[in-house]
Image (tube, rainbow, N blue to C red):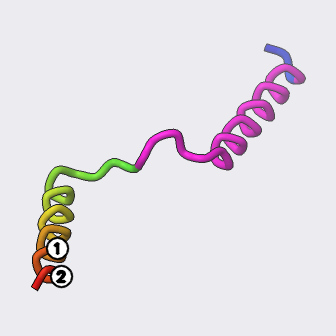
Amino acid sequence: MNRRKKIKQLLKAHAKKASAKLAPPSKSKYISKADRLKLAAESGDDSIISEN
């Protein structure tokens, strides 16, 4: 691979990574099962407290 092609390939890869960082995330962040249960318990407790 000649020098010019290698440099062009590196610059292209860096540009691709930079644009991917700026793009909005396509999926939501992973939440573990334990954290989901905690959130559900907290939201369940809040609804009970607000009813009283």
Q: In percent of the image, x 17 and y 73: which residue is there?
A: 47
Query: Residue 11 lies in magenta, yes or no?
Result: yes
Q: Position of residue 40 (x, y in %)?
A: 17, 61
Q: What amino acid type should be assigned to the residue bearing mark 2?
A: Ser
In this rendering, the answer to whether 42 lies above or below 2 is below
The percent coordinates of residue 27 (x first, y second) are 45, 41
Q: Amino acid at mark 1?
A: Ser
Residue at horizontal 83%, vertical 29%?
Answer: 7
Q: Is residue 43 above or below residue 26?
A: below
Q: Nearer the viewer, residue 52 or 32?
A: 52
Kindly state the secondary structure of the residue where label 2 is placed.
helix
Figure check: 32 above or below 26: below
Crowd band around label 1 with a 10 angstrom C-alpha radius: few (<14), some (14–19), many (20+): few
Secondary element under disc 1, as helix, strand or loop, is helix
Q: Main secondary structure of the magenta part?
A: helix
Q: Which residue is mark 2?
A: 50
Q: Considering the image in quadrants, where does the N terminus appear?
A: top right
Image check: 44 left or right of 2?
left
| 11 lies left or right of 41 | right
Residue 47 image label? 1
Which residue is situated farthest in the right direction here?
4
Q: Which residues are magenta?
A: 4-28
